[in-house]
Structure formats: structure tokens, C-alpha cells
DNA sequence: GGTCTGACCGGCG
DNA sequence: ACGCCGGCCAGAC
């Protein structure tokens, strides 16, 4: 097999498993709760690379089984709303689950926050 | 190769 | 919890 083809395969497998790990965690977020990119990153052991979790969400865009709207940034801001069908999709889905939002900010954030490192084993 | 850009985060003021 | 900064790392030029 050609060298470049092998590298491509490794990269695909790497990103595949990383995406899958992220998706599995996101799928476990209960309705009406939210978590943050950094919390997922810590849970997966990727530490400070929370950006990669956000990057993984871009790929999750196609997968409707992944409730990406339940992932916000560390202060409860809906930073990913522009990546949904419309800029209001994310907020509407959350409000339908009972999450209060004002000015793109999740209200009672500490109560609604779901930390995988604490809730999962 | 360098350089820039993010759905980010922790620390500091 | 506002604002800035340095760190993070994959992808696009």
C-alpha cells in the first residue's frame, strides 16, 4: 500500500474513534441538561484540547442522533448556534426541553449543568 | 514550510 | 461574569 494512502487511513481511524467517543458522551446527556466542550474533553482525557470537541461537532452535524444543542461553552453561552439550520434552532430545542435561555445564555447554568466526569464512571 | 482561524479553557485583573 | 492572553491542535491556504 502506498505511504500516503496508509497515512490517510490512520488519520481516518483516529478521527473516527475520537468523533465516536465524543458522540457517545453527548448521547448520554439527559433531556433538559447541558454540558460543555471542556467537560467532554476532560472526560475523554484529551485535557486542554476542548477545541477538538467543537471540531468534532462540525462532523456531528450530519448525525441527527447526536443532541449537539445540549453542548455549550463553559459559561453557558450558546456559541454553536450559528452552525444549526437557523440561528434559533439551538435555543428552540433547549427551551422545548425546559432549559431557560436569555440572551444566548443558559439560565440557572450550575443547576442544569451535567458533568460527565461526575455523572459517569 | 509558515500563518491564520476557530461550536474552547484557565488564569489573571 | 467582562476582557485579554497564552495554550491547544486540525485544516485550509
Image (cartoon, coloured by chain):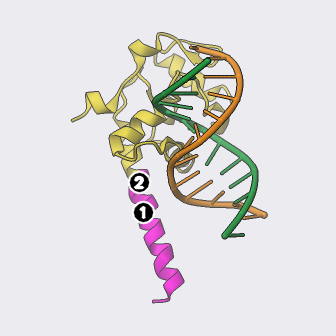
Chain colours: A yellow, B green, C orange
Residue C4 image-quadrant placement:
top right
Q: Position of residue A52 (x, y in %)?
A: 51, 48
In front here: A20 or A111? A111
Q: Which residue is mark 1?
A: A14
Q: Chain of mark 2?
A: A
* Disc 2 to disc 1, C-alpha distance: 6 Å
Per the image, is A71 magenta? no
Structural crowding at the residue carrying mark 1, measured as other residues with C-alpha within 10 Å and reported as few (<14), some (14–19) or many (≥20) = few
Residue B8 image-quadrant placement:
top right
Q: Residue furthest left?
A: A121
Considering only vertical position in the picture, is A3 above or below A115? below
Per the image, is A10 magenta? yes
Examine the rendering and report whether any part of residue A6 can be seen.
yes
Instruction: Classify the position of the N terminus of chain A by image quarter.
Output: bottom left
Q: Position of residue A44 (x, y in %)?
A: 35, 45
Residue A31 image-quadrant placement:
top left
SS class, disc 2: helix
Q: Position of residue A22 (x, y in %)?
A: 41, 45
Q: Are marks 2 and 1 in contact (CB under 8 Å)?
A: yes
SS class, disc 1: helix
Q: Which residue is mark 2?
A: A18
In front here: A89 or A72? A72
Q: Residue at position x 39%, y 12% from top? A: A111
Q: Is residue A103 left or right of residue A17?
A: right
**Magenta residues, as a range?**
A1-19
Q: Main secondary structure of the magenta part?
A: helix
Q: Residue furthest bottom?
A: A1
Instruction: Classify the position of the C terminus of chain A by image quarter.
Output: top left
Amino acid at each position: 500500500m502506498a505511504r500516503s494512502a496508509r497515512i490517510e487511513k490512520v488519520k481516518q481511524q483516529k478521527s473516527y474513534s475520537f468523533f465516536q467517543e465524543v458522540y457517545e458522551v453527548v448521547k448520554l446527556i439527559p433531556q433538559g441538561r447541558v454540558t460543555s466542550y471542556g467537560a467532554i474533553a476532560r472526560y475523554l482525557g484529551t485535557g486542554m484540547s476542548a477545541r477538538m470537541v467543537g471540531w468534532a461537532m462540525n462532523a456531528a452535524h450530519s448525525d441527527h442522533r447526536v443532541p449537539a444543542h445540549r453542548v455549550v461553552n463553559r459559561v453557558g453561552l450558546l456559541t454553536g448556534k450559528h452552525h444549526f439550520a437557523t440561528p434559533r434552532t439551538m435555543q428552540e430545542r433547549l427551551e422545548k426541553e425546559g432549559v431557560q435561555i436569555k440572551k444566548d445564555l443558559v439560565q440557572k447554568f450550575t443547576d442544569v449543568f451535567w458533568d460527565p466526569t461526575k455523572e459517569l464512571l
